[in-house]
């Protein structure tokens, strides 16, 4: 009975594939679960410590920060076995969140100081650190997964991995929803504890799949290609520029709508904990939608209608959301819009994006993908933040933001059609982009 249900949801996975993707789903659940707990903390604390009007500038600052981080990451890819990066990078964030929990209780640095100021560095550091986690760690996980999976297996198993991630992303915001009773410093300790489990689970996975480690070790024998190889490949390959567009254009639109939602929420709710709880509800609802869709729709739609249809369906849906927000710009309409955009991006767009990396080289999977998910994603958010900073009047932002968003959707649809067609050709001909 259970196997019949699984086959309907994910296709004919082999027993070995169930074990592999099941383990990976558990790892990704903790990565995304801790991240979705960080997100409400990031915004609520920044608005309390620095001020909500500086959110667009914080997003733009994250782009500048990510350039040296991605260059360092590219160097580590050449120096360290790929799975070991999933030990090293989380360790930094474990220490950071443990120290931050202590500083939040400080009488002048932390929450006891209720006067927002752009000069309070601690708020900026928290925001940028969490932004960097979202840019680096999920992308690293997908790079590791893509380097060990073929296209046919991915179409069957990636929906299972996404389902695991959505379970984590529902559990993470549940803690944020109780910020008033738990307290902000303790929430940071919970994040650190969740991150500690990630390298432990990766070790367990590699131990039970030694062929993955052996394959990765063979890949290390390839000559180092340098800091900027990922960027060079990105700008020289139209297919990779297409993946960049599919992976990041929606972030411009989401950033515009997201800022409006948080701006209004900060006016409605009058404490850091209450804003955190509201954003926890948002994160949980978005990920419940993504989980339901991942369970009953992701694998079926990709297998039934193909990659190109799936890639185009998302921008069409986003266009509908933008039009509805334009007509009814209330807090709960913005809430529903962000739930729809984030839910569909995690459940449909992300798996499609990762499938497009499969007919590519190792350098592209690890180095170029980090530029796309890290620098590309933050640049798109910075572009959306630039729109938010330009139109400070709410009515002007709603009007011009909607016009700009619909223009982006038009370009996005054309890009999605191109990369979907190109991917089909690459898989059919057995070619690799390198």
Image (cartoon, rainbow, N blue to C red):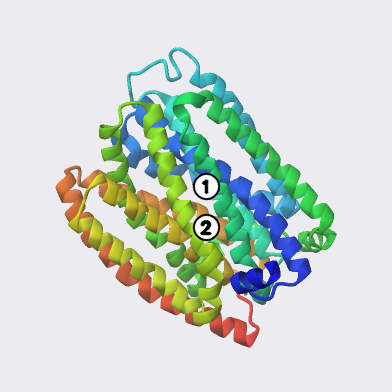
Residue pictured at 46% horizontal, 35% vertical: 177
Q: Is residue 158 left or right of residue 385?
A: right
- Mark 1 falls on what kind of element? helix
Query: For this rendering, which residue is in front, 83 or 310?
Result: 310
Residue pictured at 48% horizontal, 25% vertical: 181
Instruction: Please give the residue where the numbered disc 1 appears in the rendered image.
Output: 170
- Pinpoint residue 62: horizontal percent, then vertical percent: 44, 43
| Mark linked to residue 291 | 2
- Mark 2 falls on what kind of element? helix
Alpha-carbon neighbours of circle 1 within 10 Å: few (<14), some, or many (≥20)?
Answer: many
- Pinpoint residue 325: horizontal percent, then vertical percent: 24, 56
Q: Which of marks 1 and 2 is nearer the N terminus?
A: 1
Q: In this view, does 238 lie to the left or right of 369?
A: left
Residue pictured at 30% horizontal, 44% vertical: 261
User: Does the image show residue 154?
Assistant: no
| Mark linked to residue 63 | none
128 up-or-down from 381: above or below: above
- Pinpoint residue 210: horizontal percent, then vertical percent: 84, 59
Q: Which quadrant is the N terminus positioned in?
A: bottom right
100 up-or-down from 318: above or below: above
Q: Is residue 305 left or right of residue 11?
A: left
Q: Which quadrant is the C terminus positioned in?
A: bottom right
Distance, label 1 to label 2, CA atoms, is: 9 Å
């Amino acid at each position: 009975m259970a196997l019949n249900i699984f086959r309907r949801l994910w296709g004919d996975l082999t027993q070995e594939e169930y074990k592999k993707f099941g383990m990976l789903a558990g790892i990704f659940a903790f990565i995304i679960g801790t991240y979705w707990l960080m997100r409400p903390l990031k915004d609520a604390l920044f608005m309390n410590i620095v001020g909500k009007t500086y959110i667009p500038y914080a997003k733009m600052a994250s782009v500048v920060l990510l350039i040296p981080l991605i260059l360092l990451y590219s160097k580590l890819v050449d120096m360290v076995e790929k799975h070991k990066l999933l030990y090293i990078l989380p360790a930094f964030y474990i220490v950071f969140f443990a120290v931050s929990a202590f500083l939040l209780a400080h009488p002048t640095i932390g929450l006891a100081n209720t006067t927002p100021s752009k000069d309070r560095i601690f708020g900026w550091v928290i925001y940028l650190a969490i932004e960097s986690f979202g840019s680096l760690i999920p992308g690293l996980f997908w790079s590791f997964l893509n380097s060990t999976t073929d296209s046919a297996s991915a179409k069957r198993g990636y929906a299972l991995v996404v389902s695991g991630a959505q379970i984590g992303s529902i559990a993470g915001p549940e803690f944020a929803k109780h910020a008033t009773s738990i307290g902000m410093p303790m929430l940071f300790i919970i994040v650190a504890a969740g991150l500690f489990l990630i390298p432990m689970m990766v070790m367990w996975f590699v131990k039970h799949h030694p062929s993955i480690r052996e394959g990765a070790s063979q890949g290390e024998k390839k000559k180092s290609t340098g800091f900027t190889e990922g960027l060079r490949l990105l700008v020289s390959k139209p297919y990779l520029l297409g993946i960049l567009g599919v992976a990041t254009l929606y972030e411009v639109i989401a950033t515009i709508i997201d800022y409006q939602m948080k701006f209004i929420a900060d006016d409605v709710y009058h404490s850091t904990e209450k804003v955190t709880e509201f954003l926890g509800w948002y994160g949980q609802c978005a990920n419940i939608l993504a989980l339901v869709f991942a369970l009953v729709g992701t694998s079926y739609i990709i297998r039934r209608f193909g990659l190109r249809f799936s890639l185009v369906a998302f921008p069409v849906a986003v266009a509908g959301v933008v039009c509805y927000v334009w007509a009814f710009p209330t807090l709960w309409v913005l809430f529903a819009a962000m739930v729809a955009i984030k839910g569909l991006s995690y459940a449909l767009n992300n798996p499609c994006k990762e499938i497009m990396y499969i007919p590519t080289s190792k350098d592209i999977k690890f180095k170029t993908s980090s530029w796309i998910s890290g620098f590309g994603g933050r640049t798109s958010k910075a572009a959306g933040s630039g729109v938010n900073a330009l139109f400070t009047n709410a009515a002007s932002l709603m009007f011009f933001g909607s016009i700009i968003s619909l223009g982006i959707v038009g370009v996005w649809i054309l890009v999605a059609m191109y990369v979907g067609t190109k991917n089909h050709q690459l898989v059919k001909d057995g070619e690799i982009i390198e």
